[in-house]
Image: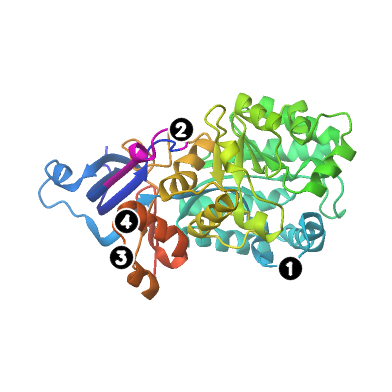
């Protein structure tokens, strides 16, 4: 047997090790001003004060030191559409209009494998440039679009969750599939990609209005046959959308009940938005372990509404909530910017979020929403070594502002409100440097 590949990183370390919505926030924060991480074969084998770890390392061990920077867990994006990268910032009225005008047109180009490969490569690089190490993403209805995304992610050894969109009505004919074809294509893609390397598969009906009852039924069948996969869709994003669902499924009690009826709620079912969930629906999410992806930049951009984070994380029935950029209705790949907007949305709901709560949502909170809390989200021993080097002094304005912070919490808060892709100095995937600013 050959020697294990070892990577050693030194610098200020900060991570959130438990849910601050349920426990005292200060007790959830771990900060080590002079910390060290030792990685072997892609996993963290030592993590803690540098002074302690240095004593255990053989003399002459090489390590990289990040002076005046922060080592944080890799950001985790719980809802994004890689196939919408090229329509970011497109003016639209609200959700349905935006889908019909831009999305359905843009996604048809993914029938062309050359175009799909180009966007998939750019998408993965852009995630890494922004410090995002794992994402749950929609592809298009074409199976090739899934292949192209997983091929790009595999090349970079990223932990990626993705799936073919299932959509057999209320869309352009060139984009629609059939229930039978969607079942067969998805089954083949699960066999090809799920748990191959770091890839995981998500059964992906776009949303209830674009799937017939027959297709939702086969989606539920797929999940019962492959229970370790994910379900990924949209839920209660927009009031007109909710009214449309009611019209299409008059026999159901509500939007979430449509998915529940077809066996599409439970652990590893992740629904984007949930802006207009009722208390009964939130209770059902909690009871079943169904997670919500909060997508503030998208909800603001399309005027969908202000997500009730304070209700979702009610300690009496706390839902697993992660953060999502929701590119392309979302306006930034940066999870720092997404945290910034999440803070503002919460402020408008009279629920101020400090940095500990918000960084939790982007790291361990998102990992738990994806049922990956045992693998990702912190810098603890045993976790996969996906982490980011943040530069608090990345811009002249940040450098000026950081002179006047008095705690790590304040430093994190300034980073999440004033930082962006420029604040990411490096991104590590499984202990290997996958991106470095300026290169």
Instruction: Residue 58: tell me if it is visible.
Output: yes
Badge 2 density bin: few <14, some 14–19, many ≥20, Cα 10 Å: few
Alpha carbon distance from label 1 to label 3: 39 Å
Residue bearing mark 4: 70
Percent across and percent down for residue 20 are: 43, 38
Closer to us: 342 or 12: 342
Residue bearing mark 1: 91
Left or right of residue 348: residue 52: left
Alpha carbon distance from label 2 to label 4: 25 Å
Outermost residue toward the bottom in this view: 396
Say which element carries label 3: loop
Percent across and percent down for residue 64 are: 24, 58
Q: If the image is split into quadrants, where does the N terminus sit?
A: top left
Between circles 4 and 3, the one closer to the viewer is: 3
Between circles 2 and 3, the one closer to the viewer is: 3
Residue bearing mark 2: 22
Alpha carbon distance from label 4 to label 3: 17 Å
């Amino acid at each position: 047997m050959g020697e294990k590949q070892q990577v050693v990183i030194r610098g200020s370390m900060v991570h959130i090790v438990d849910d601050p919505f349920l426990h005292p926030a200060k007790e959830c924060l771990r900060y080590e001003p002079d910390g060290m991480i030792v990685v072997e074969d892609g996993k963290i084998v030592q993590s803690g004060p540098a002074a302690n770890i240095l004593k255990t390392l053989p003399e002459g061990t090489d390590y990289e030191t990040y002076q005046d920077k922060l080592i944080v867990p890799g950001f985790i994006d719980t809802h994004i559409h890689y196939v919408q990268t090229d329509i970011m910032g497109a003016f639209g009225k609200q959700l349905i209009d935006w889908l019909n005008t831009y999305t359905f047109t843009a996604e048809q180009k993914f029938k062309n494998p050359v175009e799909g490969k180009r966007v998939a490569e750019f998408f993965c690089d852009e995630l890494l440039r922004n410090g995002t190490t794992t994402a749950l993403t929609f592809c298009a209805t074409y199976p090739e679009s899934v292949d192209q995304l997983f091929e790009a992610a595999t090349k970079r050894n990223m932990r990626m969750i993705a799936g073919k969109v299932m959509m057999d009505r209320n869309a352009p004919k060139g984009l629609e599939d059939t229930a039978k074809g969607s079942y067969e294509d998805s089954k083949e893609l699960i066999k090809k990609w799920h748990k191959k390397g770091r890839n995981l598969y998500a059964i992906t009906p776009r949303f209830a209005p674009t799937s017939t009852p027959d297709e939702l039924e086969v989606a539920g069948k797929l999940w019962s046959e492959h229970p370790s996969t994910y379900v990924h869709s949209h839920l209660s994003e927009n009031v007109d959308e909710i009214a449309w669902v009611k019209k299409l499924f008059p026999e159901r009690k509500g939007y979430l009940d449509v998915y529940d009826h077809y066996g599409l709620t439970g652990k590893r079912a992740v629904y984007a938005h949930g802006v207009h969930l009722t208390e009964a629906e939130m209770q059902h999410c909690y009871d079943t372990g169904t997670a919500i992806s909060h997508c503030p930049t998208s909800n603001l951009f399309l005027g969908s509404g202000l997500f009730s984070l304070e209700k979702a994380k009610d300690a009496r029935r706390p839902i697993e909530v992660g953060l999502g950029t929701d590119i392309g209705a979302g306006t930034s790949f940066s999870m720092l910017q997404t945290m910034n907007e999440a803070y503002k949305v919460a402020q408008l709901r009279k629920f101020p979020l400090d940095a500990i709560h918000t960084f939790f949502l982007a790291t361990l909170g998102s990992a738990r929403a994806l049922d990956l809390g045992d693998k990702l989200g912190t810098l603890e021993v045993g976790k996969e070594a996906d982490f980011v080097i943040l530069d608090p002094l990345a811009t002249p304005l940040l450098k000026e502002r950081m002179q006047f912070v008095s705690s790590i919490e304040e430093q994190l808060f300034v980073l999440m409100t004033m930082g962006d892709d420029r604040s990411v100095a490096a991104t590590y995937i499984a202990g290997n440097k996958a991106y470095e600013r300026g290169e």
